[in-house]
Image (cartoon, rainbow, N blue to C red):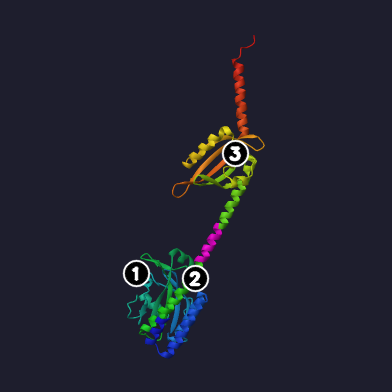
């Protein structure tokens, strides 16, 4: 506020300064209270025009690089309103966009001596404009976020993190006007207030977008978790995921089928990841020891071994293990799929026994 007060003390009559100061303070209060952008723009144009005796004050919001729309207006009784009018040819050329993004206010004291194109002069004549001030309204942030939050913004390849949202424009229609430094400073100040409101809107949009993204991610995770649980709960195979802590393994997950195959509770494996080894047949312990060595080396393993259940029943297990490396290439997790293959093994053993008996029969002398 200090800079603004200094400007007005130097350039504006005391009686006007007090009214203008109150107006600026009110605009700032509206922004702090989170007033909607459309209402804020209406307040600015309706308050600014009579304070500085402008014939018309408008806000033009870009819809594309070549098309804008008047979204807020205050106009004197003797001049035509242009609210909701489309404004074409607003910033076609890249160099003009670049100038606007560098916060350059355009001053036109007389449309006929400002070097404008015939089309631009005709457009301003149509709206009865003799002279005008154009202050670019810029929104700062990631171009993708800005484009999603505010449709129609225009950016430039040479300038990052800045996009052109639109313009705050003062028109003089009764006669040409020699714009003073106070006009530029006040317009610039109010433009900054609009930009602050836009930044707040962008921040809310980003917060909401992140919340929605997180919600979708959580929903997708829950759905994936539910599918996995349904899958794990309805297959005969035992799924285990272990995390390696130096020389120890910690169980992260074991499917319910572990209890059917091993005859031990899942909780026992969570409490002690090595407890399943107690079930391994003594003659097959060497297979398990070698499996751990291979996994730490990053090698997949596939082995068959026997376990002895608490009820004394012996079962055959086909165990496939897959090491998982972290971002620095060290194995820190292992996933395992174990399957009860006892029926197949018994069939193989029975088939082998039959073959051996058949071989003995074939070798024995035939009866005469």
Q: Is residue 224 left or right of residue 6?
A: right
- What residue would you read off at disc 3? 278
Q: Name which of mark 2 and mark 1 comes first in the sequence.
A: 1
- Residue found 53% across the figure and 34% down from its top: 286
Q: Are marks 1 and 3 in contact (CB under 8 Å)?
A: no
Name the image quarter holding the N terminus: bottom left
Judge whether residue 78 can be spotted in this image.
no
Q: Please tell me in which quadrant of the rendered image residue 221 appears.
A: bottom right
Q: Quadrant of the C terminus?
A: top right
Residue that label 1 marks:
95
Measured Cα–Cα span from mark 2 to mark 1: 28 Å
State whether the magenta stretch is mostly helix, strand or loop: helix
Whichever of labels 1 and 3 marks the residue nearer the N terminus, that label is 1
Q: In this rendering, is residue 93 above or below 174?
A: above
| Image depth: mark 1 or mark 3 in front | 3
Judge whether 245 appears above or below 208 on screen.
above
- Residue 262 location (% of width, % of height): 62, 40
In magenta segment, residue 213:
yes
Q: Earlier in the sequence, mark 3 or mark 2?
A: 2
In contact (CB < 8 Å): disc 2 and disc 1: no
Q: Please tell me the numbered disc located at residue 109.
A: none
* Residue range (magenta): 206-217
Q: Is residue 173 magenta?
A: no
- In the figure, 102 relative to 177: above or below? above
Mark 2 burial class by Cα count in 10 Å: few <14, some 14-19, many 20+: some
Q: CA distance from mark 3 to mark 2?
A: 63 Å
- Total marks shown come to 3
Q: Secondary structure at mark 2?
A: helix
- Residue 197 in picture, x, y percent from top left: 48, 74
Q: Is residue 307 left or right of residue 72?
A: right
Question: Foreground mark, 3 or 2?
Answer: 3
Residue at label 2? 201
């Amino acid at each position: 506020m200090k800079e603004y007060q200094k400007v007005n003390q130097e350039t504006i009559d005391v009686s006007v300064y007090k009214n203008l100061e109150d107006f600026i303070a009110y605009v700032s209060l509206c922004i702090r209270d989170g007033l909607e952008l459309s209402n804020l723009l209406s307040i600015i144009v309706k308050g600014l025009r009579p304070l500085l005796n402008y014939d018309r004050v408008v806000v033009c919001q870009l819809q594309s690089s070549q098309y804008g729309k008047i979204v807020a207006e205050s106009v004197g009784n003797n001049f035509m309103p242009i609210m909701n009018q489309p404004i074409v040819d607003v910033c076609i050329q890249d160099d003009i966009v670049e100038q606007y993004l560098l916060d350059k206010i355009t001053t036109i004291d007389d449309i006929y001596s400002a070097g404008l194109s015939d089309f631009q002069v005709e457009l301003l004549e149509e709206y009865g404009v003799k002279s005008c001030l154009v202050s670019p309204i810029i929104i700062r942030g990631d171009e993708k976020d800005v484009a999603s939050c505010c449709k129609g913004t225009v950016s430039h390849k040479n300038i990052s993190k800045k996009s052109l949202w639109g313009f705050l424009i003062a028109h003089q229609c009764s006669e040409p006007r020699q714009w003073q430094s106070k006009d530029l400073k006040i317009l610039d100040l109010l433009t900054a207030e609009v930009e602050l409101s836009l930044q707040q809107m962008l921040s809310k949009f980003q917060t909401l977008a992140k919340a929605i993204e997180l919600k979708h991610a959580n929903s997708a995770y829950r759905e994936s978790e539910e599918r996995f649980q349904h899958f794990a709960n309805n297959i005969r195979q035992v799924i285990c995921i272990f995390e390696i802590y130096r020389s120890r393994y910690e169980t992260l997950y074991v499917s319910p089928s572990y209890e059917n195959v091993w005859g031990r509770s899942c909780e026992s494996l969570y409490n002690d990841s090595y407890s399943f080894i107690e079930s391994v047949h003594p003659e097959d312990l060497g297979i398990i020891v070698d499996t751990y060595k291979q996994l730490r080396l990053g090698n997949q393993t596939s082995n068959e071994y026997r376990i002895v259940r608490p009820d004394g029943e012996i079962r055959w297990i086909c165990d496939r293990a897959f090491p998982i490396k972290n971002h620095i290439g060290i194995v820190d997790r292992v996933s395992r799929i174990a399957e009860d293959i006892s029926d197949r093994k018994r069939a193989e053993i029975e088939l082998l026994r039959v073959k051996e008996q058949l071989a003995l029969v074939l070798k024995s002398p035939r009866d005469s």
